[in-house]
Image (cartoon, coloured by chain):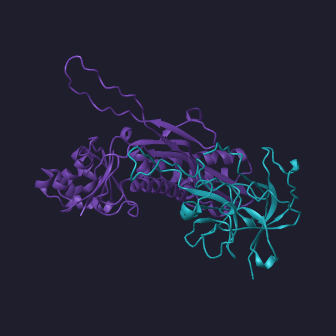
Chain colours: A purple, B cyan
Amino acid sequence: MPQTLTREETRLLNQETFEKIASDDPALHKEAAETLNDFTRLRVREESYFDQILPPETITNDQLDRDLTEGNFRIEEMEPDSPGAISVPLASTPTTMYIRGRKYKVQFDRMKTRRFQKDVSSLRTWRMDIRQVLSDNSIKDLHTERDRKWQAAVDAVLGAAGAVNPMSGTAQHVNIAGGVTREFIAEMLKVTQGTIFSIPTKTILLNNLTFMDYFKFDRLEYGGDLAERVMTSGVSVINGLAGMNWITTIKRTLVPNNAHFLYPDPSFLGKHYQLEEPTMSVKREDFMLEWYTYEESGASIGHLGSFGRANAT
Amino acid sequence: MPRRMPTHHTLDVLKGLRPPNDVDFHAAMDPADVTGANAIQGGIVFAGRCVSLNANGQFILGVGNSEMPMFLFNNSDDADVVNDGGDVTTEPDAWKGSSPTGKLKAIVAIMGAEFETTEFKSDVNYAINDLLTAAKSVAAGAGGDATNLALAGVLVKIPGAITASHVVGQVSTKFTVGDAANKNVHQRNVLRFWGLHWPKTT
């Protein structure tokens, strides 16, 4: 959770941060940048829904694979499938299967924000946390881009409602009529468990407006006092409903109304690596301050049959 | 597919702004420009080629009458451009990367720089101050001049009057066929030029 500072603590922090930025000493600029880095990294992690669905793992240079190109990538292996055992009469010979495993590739690219500028002097009297002033835009830009890229990949795999997934042989993006009801929840959870892989959903992603529809359940539908708690405290108390982890987002351009994205345990889904943590570059030239943030990460969906989408229509 | 190294097709900025301050532009290639009838080298667009933007904001090879010329820094199959996991709508063992995003980097011709490229017609001589152009692929619009698909986006000398071509560069160092002095450290023929943008007017 971000620090909650008193007004006086904010004033002192601002003064200290401002003095470092306004100084002629490059070492103090670096200190200011490192403070901003810590602040930025924490906020990006918390506000990206992709990071909650498939948490990033830090990866180092020695874990990268190599080929003749200069790109950064890592090869991941999938568990080999097997056709199963059969019953045979005595003296029968088993069928041979040469084991081959599938692999997939995680490739990396760099994300960067816009380069922001400000006259140092105009920061003198800011009362709000200067760290927030300098990093808020970067944070928003980075986690939005993380989520946008992930959502584009998910939407490409799922296709339109009813499209047959080539890996599972069934539709993993479905429309379920009747709106948000107990029946909808049951049918929704069958989407991924009903495939040949039978992978249970662990996390559900929906937007904040769709989440409001769960406010409409009555006592009978909630099955007890949860209905009262929802009425008094809001829908936030239903996290854990049906044993799921519910993630809500305000990014409705990425997660449309009525859509529920169904994700398994991350080990079934793919890999997400962080090669370079979000890093803020701060440069001061005379009275002008400029800064931008960059990071390098990569993610791939390895198991196309592990996730799904249900729309409450 | 023949083995290809990162040194085979390149663009270098010999003089001028460097990252992160160069005047670059990021966009995806127009798929129609690299597949089907316009297939270039097996669907791959090489670094060093001249590109411009179509009406959808995608790169296309070469220039027409007046589009801003740019020079590609990436190959279209570089690891930081594309992660080709196959067709997720038809292949059961495909994968889907959320990165990279298919965008290439190109440097704007009028940034104010001296460039060096491997992507030029290297079987002719170039004198200092020769003017250069780069044609679109044949089917990429009515303004295409290329008669040979392999030359789309490749720098060539302007064929006639300056006003009858869209000039994208001017040679800074002479190039003589077979002269070892025209090779870079990787023993590849390179052409050195300053970027320009003089639209065609006749």
Give B41 or A202, whichever is nearer the viewer.
B41
Relative to A82, residue A199 above or below? below
Q: Can residue A200 be spotted in the picture? A: yes
Give the image location of residue B128, x and y in percent: 89, 63
Give the image location of residue B181, x and y in percent: 88, 49
Q: Quadrant of residue B164?
A: bottom right
Q: Is residue A57 left or right of residue B2?
A: left
Give B82 or A178, whichever is nearer the viewer.
B82
* Residue at screen point 79% across, 53% down: B190
Give A102 or A201, whichever is nearer the viewer.
A102
Give the image location of residue A283, x and y in percent: 69, 54
Q: Which residue in the rendered view is the most extreme toward the top?
A: A91
Q: Which residue in the rendered view is the most extreme toward the bottom?
A: B202
Q: Can residue A129 be spotted in the picture? A: no
Give the image location of residue B90, x and y in percent: 39, 52
Q: Is residue B126 left or right of residue B48?
A: right
Q: Is residue B29 left or right of residue A153?
A: right
Relative to A307, residue A312 above or below? below
Give A60 or B120, whichever is nearer the viewer.
B120
| Placement of the C terminus of chain A among the 4 image quadrants | bottom left
Q: Is residue A176 left or right of residue A292?
A: left
* Residue at screen point 64% across, 58% down: B105
Q: What count of labels does the image hold?
A: 0
Q: Quadrant of residue B49?
A: bottom right
